[in-house]
Image (spheres, grey):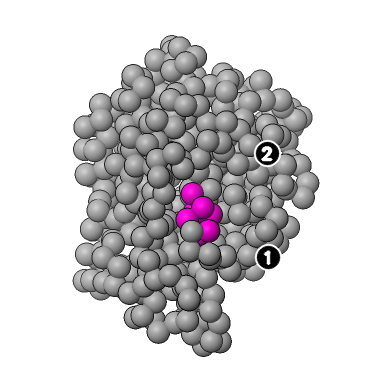
Amino acid sequence: MISRTTRILLDLEDVPKHFVNVLPHLEEPLAPPLDPSTGEPIGPEALTAIFPVECVKQEVAQEPRIPIPDEVREAYMQFGRPTPLQRAVRLEAALKTPARIYYKREDLSPTGSHKLNTALVQTFYARNEGVKRYATETGAGQWGSAVALACSYFGLQAMIYMVRISYEQKAARAVLMRAYGAEIVPSPSDRTEFGRKLNKEHPGHPGSLGIAISEALEDAVNTPDTKYTLGSVLNHVLLHQTVIGQETMAQLAQVEETPDAVIGCIGGGSNFAGIAYPFLADKKFKDIELLGVEPIACPSMTRGEFRYDFGDTAGMTPKIKMYTLGKDFTPPKIHAGGLRYHGVAPSISALIASGRVRPIAYDQVSVLESALFFAKHEGIIPAPETAHAVKAAIDLARNAKETSEEKVIVFNLSGHGHFDMAAYQALMAGQLESDVPIDLPTPSVAA
């Protein structure tokens, strides 16, 4: 009989000692980044101007496993790793489903999400290289909060450009970042040439992650002793999140469970990769379904094109091959600010193109309705981003009820919604809109 233990724990010594690298497990090597001026492939050395050298090495590493520095593992332990894996027993009962649902508690981080896993590593490498200051962007503020704490921990200054609409919707996030010692401004800002240009041409622009990335890059390039840190999309960032999936595998083994489906929401792709990539890299799990969930308001996976594009709006980054809506796409003002990105990680894009990862898109009303249903039965208010994974898990469980299948469903609860009460208040008041974008390319991948 399967255990009905609601919380599965690991000991401190079970914090992973390495990261899992997905690159050796892809069917084909990733398409190389291109120099935007020449269109020719560029080598990793071109990235050392903005990223720490160790991060650049990891960007192209082919080793299946990358060691985690001892000092980073100690920081992981201090800030809550290993995190629990929880079984949603009350949710299962409410759904009357034969499915068993488990969720990984990344919401228990001091900054409220999985983002601290990579912020600590990147800041550790930067400090060791003599970097004094980090510049970055943030959407909903979870990444910015993680960078602020990591910089405080390792002794760096943090400069954060927060997408304007999220800055207005989630004002308390800015307070949290400042509490950790970070400087934060809404983007587009008056701190950069690109920001000033946009504000002049489009007063009151709501901003986007692509715009905020451009501002942070401009800052990093023009400020001494400063480098840029990214919270998603690139390989080294996704690599650092694989501590999530490794712990999940060990916890499922304790209760002798094998997942049929692993789910994560996707903006750039870090939390999905964090839980899914260790399973993908292990041949024992070659038949499990991997589901990536996004908003229909920013449907880069389900309605984007698989092609080369810039990672930022100003066109400062190398071009990378990914599913994209185009660098100039400005998403509607949905509350899932962390999912308002025009592209998707190249490695996830390759897995979508090969059929290994299945993308799904939902509107924000149905997403937050599922989140409230989850909250009523599990007692946890999810962030709007991770609420997309909650909805997918509930939908799968309901399908299992219809087919009488005893499926095992696992999803990454990658953030809490404590700073997102305005979204839930709007839903309860019947004022939350189902934002659907227009004038998008013909779908490249079926939803």
Query: Disc number at residue 249?
Result: none
Q: Secondary structure at mark 1?
A: loop
Query: Can residue 325 be seen in this snapshot?
Result: no
Give the residue displayed 76% in from the left and 42% down from the top: 29
Q: Is residue 235 left or right of residue 119?
A: right
Residue 174 x/y as whole percent:
25, 38
Of residue 250 and residue 95, the one placed in the foreground of this image is 250
Location of residue 205 (image quadrant): top left
Residue 97 x/y as whole percent:
44, 82
Give the residue displayed 43% in from the left and 25% down from the top: 71
**Pointer 2 local density, CA inside 10 Å: few below 14, some 14–19, many at least 20:** some
Of residue 6 and residue 30, the one placed in the foreground of this image is 6
User: Looking at the picture, does residue 72 appear above or below residue 273?
Assistant: above
User: Looking at the picture, does residue 406 appear above or below residue 23?
Assistant: below
Query: Disc number at residue 64?
Result: 2
Q: Which residues are magenta?
A: 247-253
User: Looking at the picture, does residue 172 appear above or below residue 251?
Assistant: above
**Pointer 1 local density, CA inside 10 Å: few below 14, some 14–19, many at least 20:** few
- Label 2 is placed on what type of residue? Pro
- Label 1 is placed on what type of residue? Asp
State the count of labels: 2
Q: Is residue 282 left or right of residue 174?
A: right
Location of residue 179 (image quadrant): top left
Give the residue displayed 77% in from the left and 50% down from the top: 27
Query: Can residue 93 be seen in this snapshot?
Result: yes
Residue 148 x/y as whole percent:
32, 31
Q: In the rendered image, which residue does mark 1 sit on?
A: 287
On whether residue 267 falls in the magenta region, the answer is no
